[in-house]
Amino acid sequence: MIVTIDGVAASGKSSVASGVARALQVPYISSGLLYRGATLLGLQAGLDLHDARALLVTLQAQPLRLEPLAEGNRVWHAEQDVTEQLHSTRMDRGVSVVAALPEVRAWVDAQLRALEAPFVAEGRDMGTNVFPQAPAKFYLTASPRIRAERRARERPEDVPAIEAALILRDQLDAAQSAPATDAVVIDTGPLTLEGVIEAILAHLPARVPSA
Ligand SMILES: Nc1ncnc2c1ncn2[C@@H]1O[C@H](COP(=O)(O)OP(=O)(O)O)[C@@H](O)[C@H]1O
Ligand SMILES: Nc1ccn([C@@H]2O[C@H](COP(=O)(O)OP(=O)(O)O)[C@@H](O)[C@H]2O)c(=O)n1
């Protein structure tokens, strides 16, 4: 079984997916980390992030590997764990450029579809494009201000600056960020993190089928 949790930046996808996966005792997959990893490789190689061919050559030369651990996904580039380098405002600025490239999306989708179910997959288009057959789909929303206040706890920038950056990224990501028509949409604004996790678990069977 695959559970998909999509949503806009800082809506709570990773934290909620982690909690749901822990309750179901299955791994969770943060698809955004593969886009972030591709962006890091492009930046480190000094590439123009719009240059899909050069990015693919770099990705294929030394593939990125996503390691879905219960306590959080790790991203490896060859033998180096690059996860800690993937969450920054600079990375946020570049990743939407990379994620707009169809060739990079196809590369990420192939990595994701090679994973063995059951798992929880979070991102923007898990329930629409990558795993449309998933039997349980959720889409998280919250106002830009609420999302900025949450993210401000993790970043040095102030709330207004983070809010503006989130609104811009929402626009840049719009093409791949629509909820699936069969997704349960949850406004996480009024809910605690635990409340969102419980709301999702209430829609799921107590035990997840292995296939
Ligand atoms: N419903 C919620 N209420 C309060 N804080 C939340 C909620 N959901 C997530 N958070 C917090 O908001 C921040 C962003 O959540 P995260 O899971 O990283 O979002 P995303 O993966 O969508 O970017 C984290 O610090 C997380 O703990
Ligand atoms: N399935 C996905 C996941 C991420 N992305 C892109 O990757 C970026 C980073 O995704 P993320 O989930 O790590 O970002 P946050 O929502 O956690 O801020 C997003 O802003 C999108 O540009 C995507 O296009 N499709």
Image (spheres, grey):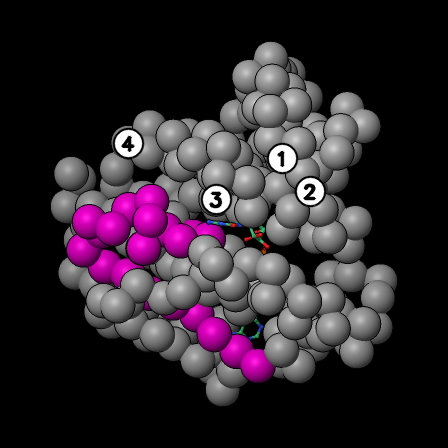
Cα separation between marks 2 and 4: 25 Å
For label 3, the residue is: 31
CB at mark 3 closer than 8 A to ligand 2? yes
Give the residue pinned by disc 1. 37
Of residues 26 and 180, which is closer to you in this image?
Answer: 180
Mark 1 touches mark 2? (CB < 8 Å): yes
User: Is residue 200 toward the left or the right of residue 148 in the image?
Assistant: left
* Tag in front: 4 or 3: 3
User: In this figure, which residue is indicated by the disc labeled 2?
Assistant: 86
Q: Would you identify the image quadrant in which residue 47 lies?
A: top right
Judge: label 2 CB < 8 Å from ligand 2. Answer: yes
Q: Residue at x 60, y 18 (%)?
A: 57
SS class of the residue under badge 2? Answer: loop
Q: Which residue is mark 4?
A: 116
User: Taking 155 as reference, is 64 above or below it?
Assistant: above
Q: What is the three-letter code of the residue carrying label 3?
A: Ser
